[in-house]
Image (tube, helix red, strand yellow):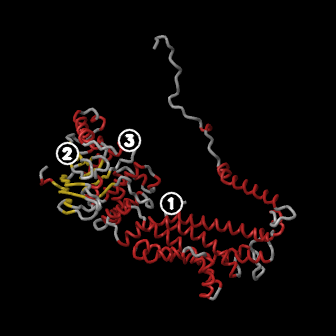
């Protein structure tokens, strides 16, 4: 990838935790272009969530760093909105209030009160959740909570959307629904996305590139696979598409043959 | 398949059980299910008590004797003949007003102190060991000291309530503040919620269920303490009423008063739980 296209740059990133003899991530180098959808896949414990947390600014880098749109990442911020695995909605707020809090917090300088109200409803509409706006997180299903989490992240107008195993806790059918939803939103908004996942099908279906991490600790990027499938993508048609099957096989080969997880 | 096989009779594709198959419980049945079991137990215990205490050597009055002895007390809690000769309602109100005052003070001071030691580890290190010792002092042990300090019964009783109920409020508030889940802190960090806004919009609501747990324990302890404190300080109040009845060997009155004390304590607990549910928007532990 040409340097001129780089929007999010992770360079020479090493993350070590105090007291640990070996760093979690070692010398990770990755460039993501604007509008690109990149999935990071690897076995559990390989440090893929650590990578996302550093990009989010929630964890400091030990060496190297992250630059987004020409500015170095030093702290968390709404330009790198995160959709957390366990949704992380505030249980005392309604769905509307959860999104509205993020909107008020991040866009109050550029939008009037009425505009923020409209923007909140617009984002709830984007994930088809207007009907649940007055419900509390405890009253809706896991898939719906994750939709609200996505709406909250999108409502911050992020430069890059960080998805931390967003569908990991959902059943297969709900997960498929939400994947389609994310593809639709990505197509409509052109958001740059970095998604952590451990689901091979999900990675191939959604991404432009799949970044495969070696086993941790001391994990690094083992291989990057380009997924050359035109969009919009249809999961039913792709199921028999040789390019899809090949890409899928390549990731499986990496994860289970060359970098099989040592016995736990 | 044989060509000669007859087609099977058509099976309805969707079989929907008629509504009457699973009878919907009527409201009456639901209420009965909640009310009946404790009522049956109550009647059984009452009968047992009647049987055991009916003998000529029984030390305590059976329910029937309580009824004949304390009928006026049971049926009219609102009479007022001046002095200490009042209905139980007035005694309870006197006790409740002391609890209200002492508990309200404890809630305010306790929550503020809890917020302080929850947020500042220096305050925590300085105050927590002292609190851990003080909270084990029995309520009544404070009474002589507070009588000496205030030189009056009323403020002394209120102080005893205050000092009894404040510890669980402080400790639970501090625990709630210190244990704001990492998830919520991450969300706050991403949307750059900092300082007082972070405290008001994340810490306080996240700690609210803990605070209400502390308040519930606190109000329970207050009610335990007030009865004992009133026995010693005298005047109008349910505690002194019981002590007075004991001095005039009026056991039936004591039994009636105990029932009132128990029911009032129960209502206090439920009331705080209910307020907690409203304030925390359903996130408090019921």
The subunit carrying tag 2 is A
The subunit carrying tag 1 is B
Q: CA distance from mark 3 to mark 2?
A: 27 Å
Would you place residue A118 above or below residue B230 in this image?
A: above
Q: Residues within 10 Å of mark 3 (few under 14, many from 20)?
A: few
Q: Nearer the viewer, residue A46 or B210?
A: A46
| Residue A218, horizontal then vertical, whole percent | 24, 53
Q: Which mark is residue A12?
A: none
Q: Nearer the viewer, residue A90 or B160?
A: B160
Mark 1: which secondary structure? loop
Q: Which residue is mark 2?
A: A223
The residue sitting at 61% across, 73% down in the picture is B222
Left/right of residue B51 with respect to residue B282 in the rendered view: right
For the residues labelled 3 and 2, say whether their Cβ atoms are less than 8 Å apart: no
Q: CA distance from mark 1 to mark 2?
A: 48 Å
Mark 3: which secondary structure? helix
């Amino acid at each position: 990838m040409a340097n001129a296209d780089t929007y999010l740059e992770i360079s020479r990133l090493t993350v070590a935790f105090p007291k640990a003899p070996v760093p979690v991530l070692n010398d990770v180098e990755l460039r993501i272009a604007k509008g690109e959808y990149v999935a990071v896949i690897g076995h559990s414990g390989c440090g893929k969530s650590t990578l996302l947390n550093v990009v989010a600014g929630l964890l400091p880098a030990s060496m190297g760093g992250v630059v987004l749109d020409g500015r170095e990442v030093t702290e968390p911020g709404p330009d790198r909105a995160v959709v957390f695995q366990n949704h992380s909605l505030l249980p005392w707020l309604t769905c509307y209030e959860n999104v509205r809090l993020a909107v008020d917090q991040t866009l109050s300088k550029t939008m009037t009160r009425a505009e923020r109200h409209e923007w909140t409803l617009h984002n709830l509409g984007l994930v088809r959740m207007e009907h649940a706006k007055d419900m509390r997180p405890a009253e809706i299903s896991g898939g719906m909570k994750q939709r609200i989490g996505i709406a909250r992240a999108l409502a911050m107008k992020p430069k890059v959307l960080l998805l931390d195993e967003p569908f990991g806790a959902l059943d297969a059918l709900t997960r498929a629904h939400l994947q389609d939803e994310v593809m639709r939103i990505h197509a409509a908004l052109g958001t740059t996305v970095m998604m952590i996942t451990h689901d091979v099908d999900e990675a191939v279906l959604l991404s432009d590139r799949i970044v495969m991490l070696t086993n941790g600790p001391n994990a690094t990027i083992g291989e990057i696979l380009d997924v050359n499938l035109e969009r919009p993508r249809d999961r039913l048609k792709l199921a028999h598409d040789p390019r899809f099957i090949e890409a899928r096989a390549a990731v499986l080969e990496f994860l289970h043959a060359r970098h099989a997880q040592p016995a736990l | 398949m044989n060509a000669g096989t007859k087609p099977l009779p058509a099976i309805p594709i969707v079989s929907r059980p008629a509504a009457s198959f699973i009878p919907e419980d009527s409201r009456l049945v639901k209420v009965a299910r909640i009310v009946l079991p404790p009522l049956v137990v109550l009647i059984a215990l009452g009968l047992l008590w009647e049987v055991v205490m009916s003998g000529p050597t029984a030390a305590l009055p059976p329910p029937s004797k309580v009824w004949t002895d304390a009928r006026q007390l049971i049926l009219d809690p609102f009479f007022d003949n001046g002095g200490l000769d009042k209905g139980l309602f007035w005694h309870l109100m006197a006790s409740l007003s002391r609890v209200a005052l002492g508990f309200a003070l404890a809630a305010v001071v306790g929550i503020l102190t809890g917020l302080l030691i929850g947020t500042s580890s220096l305050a925590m290190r300085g105050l927590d060991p002292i609190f851990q010792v003080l909270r084990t002092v029995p309520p009544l042990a404070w009474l002589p000291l507070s009588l000496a300090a205030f030189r009056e019964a009323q403020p002394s009783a209120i102080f005893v309530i205050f000092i009894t109920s404040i510890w669980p409020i402080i400790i639970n508030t501090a625990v709630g503040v210190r244990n704001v889940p990492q998830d919520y802190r991450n969300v706050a960090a991403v949307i750059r919620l900092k300082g007082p806004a972070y405290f008001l919009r994340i810490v306080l609501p996240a700690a609210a269920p803990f605070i209400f747990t502390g308040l519930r324990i606190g109000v329970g302890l207050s009610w335990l303490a007030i009865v004992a404190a009133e026995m010693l300080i005298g005047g109008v109040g349910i505690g002194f009423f019981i002590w007075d009845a004991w001095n005039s060997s009026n056991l039936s009155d004591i039994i009636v008063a105990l029932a009132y004390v128990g029911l009032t304590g129960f209502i206090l607990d439920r009331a705080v739980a209910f307020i907690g549910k409203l304030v925390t928007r359903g996130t408090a532990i019921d």
